[in-house]
Amino acid sequence: MTEMQHVPGVDRGKVILYALSTCGWCANTKKFLTDLGVGFSYIYVDLLTGEERDRVVREVERWNPRLSFPTLVVNDAQVIVGFQEEEIREAVDA
């Protein structure tokens, strides 16, 4: 099982980035969070296989039915789809 990767930083609650390893907007979102100094976890959905991939895809679909990337979930409450700098900044209070 591929675990989520964690990027250390300031604790702004539970911040999870669902991304694709080949996605430029996903890379921008990851870099933006890192530059803000926010601690977050991420997982590259396209690198998963089998049942694990199915499970994570269902998880993403729960937050974002269009299953587009990046999908950022903050504190199991706020969902930001795409690279939205201002929305991300507000969501993580940075």
Image (cartoon, rainbow, N blue to C red):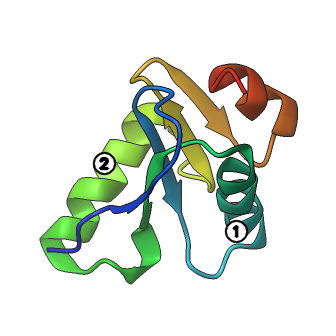
Reading the image, the residue beneath label 1 is: 27
Q: Is residue 19 left or right of residue 47?
A: right
Residue drawn at 67 percent across, 49 percent down: 33
Image quadrant where residue 43 sits: bottom left
Q: Amino acid at mark 1?
A: Ala
Asked if the residue at tag 2 contacts the one at tag 1, i.e. Cβ–Cβ closer than 8 Å, the answer is: no
Please identify the quarter of the rendering in which residue 26 is found: bottom right
- SS category of the residue bearing label 2: helix
Q: How far apart are the alpha carbons under marks 1 and 2?
A: 22 Å
- Position of residue 65 measured from the top left corner of the image (x, y, whole percent): 50, 38
The disc label shown at residue 58, or none: 2
Question: Vertically, is 86 above or below 26?
Answer: above
Q: Which amino acid type corresponds to the residue marked 2 in the rendered image?
A: Arg
Q: Quadrant of the N terminus?
A: bottom left
| Residue 52 quadrant | bottom left
Q: Position of residue 24 (x, y in %)?
A: 77, 72
Q: Position of residue 75 (x, y in %)?
A: 42, 23
Residue at point 61%, 53% (across, down): 68
Q: Does residue 76 lie above or below 52 as drawn?
A: above
Mark 1 vs 2, N-terminal side: 1
**Is residue 13 toward the left or the right of residue 50 in the image?**
right
Q: Residue at x 55, y 71 (%)?
A: 20
| Figure quadrant of the C terminus | top right
At mark 1, the secondary structure is helix
Residue 21: percent from the left, percent from the top? 56, 79
Name the residue: 68% across, 20% down.
Answer: 93
Q: Nearer the viewer, mark 1 or mark 2?
A: 1
